Each structure stands twice: as C-alpha cells, then as structure tokens.
C-alpha cells in the first residue's frame, strides 16, 4: 500500500500538512510530490483533472494574484491554455490532491481523503 498513494503537497499549506498527517495516521506512507518545486506537466495535470472530474478553472485557487493578473476568468481561454498556465504557475493549483488506484480527491477538508482509502 505504501506505493499506491500520492499526495500533491505544499508544506506551507495547513490543509496539505493536515492531509499528510491524516494519511500517515492511517499507516500510509504516500509518495509526496512538492508540486511547487516540481510542477506536474500538462499530461499529468490533464490526467489529474480527469480523475477529479473537474475542469481546469475548478482546480484553480481563484484568490491567487496570478488568477486576476492573467485574467483567467476569461471564458475564451481553452482547457489546454488553462492547463499550460497551471503548469507555469503551480501556485494556482488547489491543494492537496491525493491519488490512489487511478482515483483522485482534493483534501478539503483533509478528512475527505478517507473516501479514497
């Protein structure tokens, strides 16, 4: 089980830290991807969006300055364009994302990840 769970983690985020602690408390040692240091590529992000059943904007942190500065609410932006922007500006990606067995969930609140286990 230790190699089947991945968390896209931001150590600065309290929800992300709580989610990691929750997983570890369940005896799971997840693969930790510090996505701000190593952002997922476009294909990985597209796959995550599909697992989450979300469109790019639904996975974006709309309170980040980049969201406003880059006018990401513009409906003319395509799915592909939004994904490329998220790769370039990983702070926009909602966190944490936990993946297990081809399924993913956002740990907000952290207890939500228990649905995957």
Image (tube, rainbow, N blue to C red):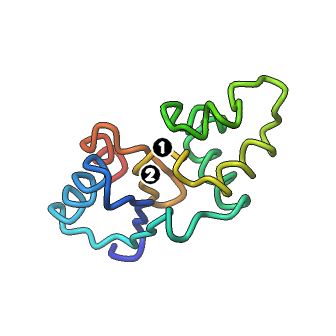
Q: Could you say where residue 93 lies in the image, as x and y percent from the top left?
A: 53, 47
Closer to us: 6 or 81: 81
Q: Splitting the image into 4 quarters, where does residue 22 fall?
A: bottom left
Residue 50 screen position, x and y as percent: 65, 45
12 on left or right of 106: left
- Residue at 50 percent of width and 69 percent of height: 37
Q: Residues within 10 Å of mark 2 (few under 14, many from 20)?
A: many
Figure quadrant of the C terminus: bottom left
Q: Is residue 106 left or right of residue 91?
A: left
* Circle count: 2
Which label sits in the foreground, 2 or 1? 1
Q: Are marks 2 and 1 in contact (CB under 8 Å)?
A: yes
The residue beneath circle 2 is 97
Looking at the image, which residue is at 53% across and 31% down?
Answer: 62
Q: Is residue 8 left or right of residue 40?
A: left
Q: Secondary structure at mark 2?
A: strand
As drawn, 25 above or below 55 = below
Q: Residues within 10 Å of mark 1 (few under 14, many from 20)?
A: many
Q: Is residue 7 above or below residue 19?
A: below
Q: Residue furthest left?
A: 25
Image quarter where the N terminus lies is: bottom left
The one nearer the camera, 66 or 56, is: 66
Name the residue rendered at 75%, 52% in the picture: 84
- Circle 1 residue: 94
Closer to us: 76 or 26: 76
Q: Is residue 21 above or below residue 109?
A: below
x, y (%) of residue 114?
28, 47
Q: Secondary structure at mark 1?
A: loop
CA separation, marks 2 and 1?
8 Å
Image height check: is 17 above or below 82?
A: below
Q: Position of residue 44 (x, y in %)?
A: 65, 61
């Amino acid at each position: 089980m230790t190699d089947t769970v991945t968390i896209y983690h931001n150590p600065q985020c309290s929800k992300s830290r709580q989610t990691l602690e929750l997983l570890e408390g369940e005896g799971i040692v997840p693969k930790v991807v510090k996505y701000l240091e190593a952002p997922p590529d476009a294909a990985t992000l597209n796959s995550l969006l599909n697992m989450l059943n979300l469109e790019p904007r639904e996975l974006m942190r709309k309170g980040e300055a980049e969201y406003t500065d880059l006018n990401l609410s513009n409906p003319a932006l395509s799915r592909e364009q939004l994904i490329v922007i998220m790769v370039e500006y990983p702070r926009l990606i909602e966190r944490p994302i936990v993946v297990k067995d081809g399924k993913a969930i956002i740990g907000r609140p952290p207890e939500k990840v228990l649905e995957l286990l």
